[in-house]
Image (cartoon, grey):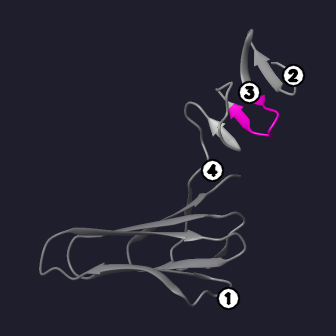
Amino acid sequence: AGTDILGFSTAGSERMRIDASGNVGIGTTDPGATLEVKGTMKVFGAWETKANGTVYQAETDGFVCAHGSVSSGRLVICGYTDSNNPPTTLRAQQGSDPSSGAHHESIMMPVRKGDYWKTTGEEVTVYWIPLGT
């Protein structure tokens, strides 16, 4: 690393750098943005299975993914999120009523840290996907 540059090295190679303008580069020695990552990175926390119909409060920003499957008949999945407990604002909805045969539906919706969220529907599997930890 040169003048006005803070570099971090492992195994004899520079892995991260903060340049004179404050840009941070991971895997690059010439970051062109506030944060530049060369290679892959993980921004999601681990997916968590949650109970359908239960109200949760988000500890971080994240996403709710809900998936349902039925062998026949109607399937409707709804997702609600806002600052109320329980949440009342419908943010995502998917449904179908085919005459016969199996079918699948899913929704995904963003949730802000601190907001409440829940999903409704029958035969629905729900996942919380946090951004960060």
Task: Please give the range of residues in magenta.
Answer: 17-25
Which of 125 and 4 lies nearest the eye of the viewer? 4
Please tell me how many numbered marks the rendered image carries.
4
Per the model, the C-alpha gap separating discs 3 and 1 is 42 Å
Which of disc 1 and disc 3 is earlier in sequence? 3
Q: Name the residue under label 4.
A: 45
* Circle 3/circle 1 CB separation < 8 Å: no
First-in-chain label (4 vs 3):
3
Q: Distance between the residues labelled 4 and 3?
A: 22 Å
Calculate the distance from the C-alpha at mark 2 to the C-alpha at mark 3: 15 Å
Q: Nearer the viewer, residue 26 or 88?
A: 26
x and y, in percent, of residue 46 in the image: 60, 49
> What secondary structure is found at the residue carrying circle 4?
loop
Q: Residue 3 carries which label?
A: 2
Which residue is the site of mark 1? 84
Mark 2 or 4: the one toward you:
2
Residue at the spot 38% in from the left edge and 73% down from the top edge: 123
Three-letter amino acid code at the position of disc 2? Thr
Among all residues in the image, which is located at the extreme right?
Answer: 4
Q: Which residue lies most toward the bottom here?
A: 88
**Three-letter amino acid code of the residue under disc 1:** Asn
Locate residue 59 relative to residue 118 in the image: left or right: right
For label 3, the residue is: 16
Q: In which quarter of the image is the N terminus?
A: top right
- Secondary element under disc 2, as helix, strand or loop, is loop
Residue sitting at x 71%, y 44%: 34
The mark closer to the camera, 4 or 3, is 3
At 79% across and 32% down in the image, what residue appears? 19
Q: Residues within 10 Å of mark 2 (few under 14, many from 20)?
A: few
